[in-house]
Amino acid sequence: MASSPTPGSVTVSGEAIRHLDLAPLEPLLYRPPAEYLARSGSVELHLEWPRAADDPRELSEIPEVRLWSLRADAVCPWLPLMLERSGGQLTRHVAMLLPHGFSRQEGIRFAPESLELWITHRLFQLDDQARGAGLNCRGGLAQMAAVLGFELDPGFWNPLPPIG
């Protein structure tokens, strides 16, 4: 069904994708927030979807893969924070969730309003869960947002309860 060739690497088979099976993510589900923070930026997600050699679509253009990713994101809201950032894992995941375009010069360009709504929701959600566990993940959340091209206003966190 699924294998994990290296720590932090999760392989999702085409069969798991077809059946919306989240078993490959089992090691990442229902953990304390401290475990999610410890894995911040370190998880690689390998989606194995069979395609014909002449299929030009990106994974985010394949409905079955996109639907699996939407389910994974709903069940594991910490997944974006845990995904590797510099190699494009986080960006690819978010491309499964949000409208976007692609240009050779600029790469993936998310619909600005969609990105703003999604990232703001996720920032509030994860910050609240982390604070509930007595943890601060705001720095990691700001990095996650920056990788996606979302600049966090310096005062973003000010209206929220302080950490600690």
Image (cartoon, rainbow, N blue to C red):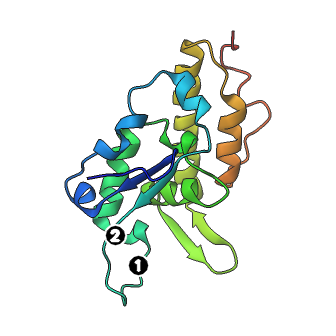
Residue 53 lies in what quarter of the image?
A: bottom left
Closer to the camera, 141 or 50? Answer: 50
Q: Position of residue 136 (x, y in %)?
A: 67, 21
Q: Position of residue 83 (x, y in %)?
A: 55, 47
- Graded by Cα atoms within 10 Å as few (under 14), some (14 to 19) or many (20 or more), the crowding at tag 1 reads few
Q: Which mark is residue 57?
A: 1
Q: Position of residue 118 (x, y in %)?
A: 51, 44
Whether the residues at callouts 2 and 1 have beta carbons within 8 Å, the answer is: yes
Q: Name the secondary structure under disc 1.
A: loop
Question: 99 left or right of 16?
Answer: right
Q: Residue at x 51, y 65 (%)?
A: 100
Residue 14 lies in what quarter of the image?
A: bottom left
142 in relation to 85, above or below: above
Q: Residue at x 46, y 54 (%)?
A: 45
Q: Name the secondary structure under disc 2.
A: loop
Question: 18 left or right of 4?
Answer: left
Residue corresponding to mark 2: 62
Residue type at mark 1? Answer: Arg
Q: In the rendered picture of this protein, how many numbered marks are placed on residues?
A: 2
Question: 132 left or right of 104?
Answer: left
